[in-house]
């Protein structure tokens, strides 16, 4: 005969196991949520930095368009703000970037055809960066970052300058950011 009393009486051992399990889950949830995990898709680590300052980059190349210094400065600021939670301030901050545009060379031949004519030209930009980390001086650096793009010599430099300049600036900014915050 089938005993209905098993279904009507609660099983106290299962109830205690369930209670223990709930307590453990609540404890784990509370302990995990109290941990602060800083993760960035860029792999950046800003450590205990909270502020950053980017000074205006002067053009020392004497060949760059007058707007390049401002474009470069703004691009570095924007990239840092997109990739980190650092507060951008004027003046001295926990992390400071300063520097100058050193090379702006758009018409250097790099590939020569059989009849001694250039088939490819190289456009190069170099930027000297001084990075200061007031919380960890071992992270400080003073380096030159260079990027280039090759273009067909049948195109005039003026035709490709704006597009290639934008690409090169973005590459240099990414290199600077990686050096400062990804520690490559």
Image (tube, grey):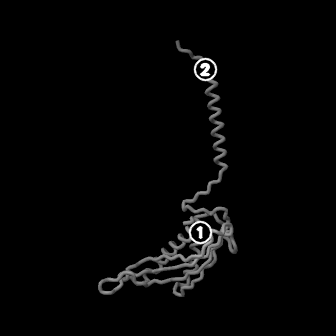
From this view, report whether residue 22 is shown above or below residue 38: above
Mark 2 or 1: in front is 1
- Graded by Cα atoms within 10 Å as few (under 14), some (14 to 19) or many (20 or more), the crowding at tag 2 reads few
Q: CA distance from mark 2 to mark 1?
A: 67 Å
Q: Position of residue 119 (x, y in %)?
A: 35, 82
Q: Say whether disc 2 or disc 1 marks the residue closer to the N-terminus.
A: 2
**In terms of secondary structure, where does tag 1 sit?**
helix
Q: Up-down: is 155 above or below 13?
A: below
- Residue 77's x, y, as percent? 60, 71
Extreme-front residue of the structure: 138
CB under 8 Å between discs 2 and 1: no
User: Residue drawn 55% across and 78% down?
Assistant: 127
Q: Which residue is mark 2?
A: 8
Res 46 quadrant in image: bottom right
Residue located at (65% from left, 72% from top): 132
Picture residue at 61% right of the left edge, 20% below the top: 8
Q: Quadrant of residue 90?
A: bottom right
Identity of the residue furthest to the top in this view = 1
Residue 22 in the image: x percent, y percent?
A: 64, 36
């Amino acid at each position: 005969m089938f005993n209905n009393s098993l279904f009507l009486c609660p099983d106290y051992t299962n109830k205690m196991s369930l209670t223990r399990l709930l307590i453990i889950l609540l404890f784990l949830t509370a302990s995990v949520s109290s941990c602060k995990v800083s993760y960035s898709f860029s792999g950046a680590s800003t450590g205990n930095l909270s502020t950053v300052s980017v000074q205006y980059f002067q053009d020392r190349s004497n060949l760059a368009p007058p707007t390049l210094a401002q474009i470069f400065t703004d691009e570095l600021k924007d990239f840092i703000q997109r990739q980190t939670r650092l507060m951008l301030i004027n003046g001295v901050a926990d992390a400071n970037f300063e520097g100058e545009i050193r090379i702006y060379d758009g018409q250097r031949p790099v590939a020569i055809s059989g009849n001694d004519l250039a088939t490819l030209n190289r456009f190069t930009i170099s930027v000297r960066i001084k990075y200061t980390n007031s919380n960890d001086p071992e992270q400080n650096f003073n380096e030159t970052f260079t990027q280039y793009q090759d273009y067909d010599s049948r195109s005039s430099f003026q035709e490709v300058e704006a597009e290639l300049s934008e690409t090169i600036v973005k590459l240099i900014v990414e290199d600077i950011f990686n050096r400062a915050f990804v520690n490559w």
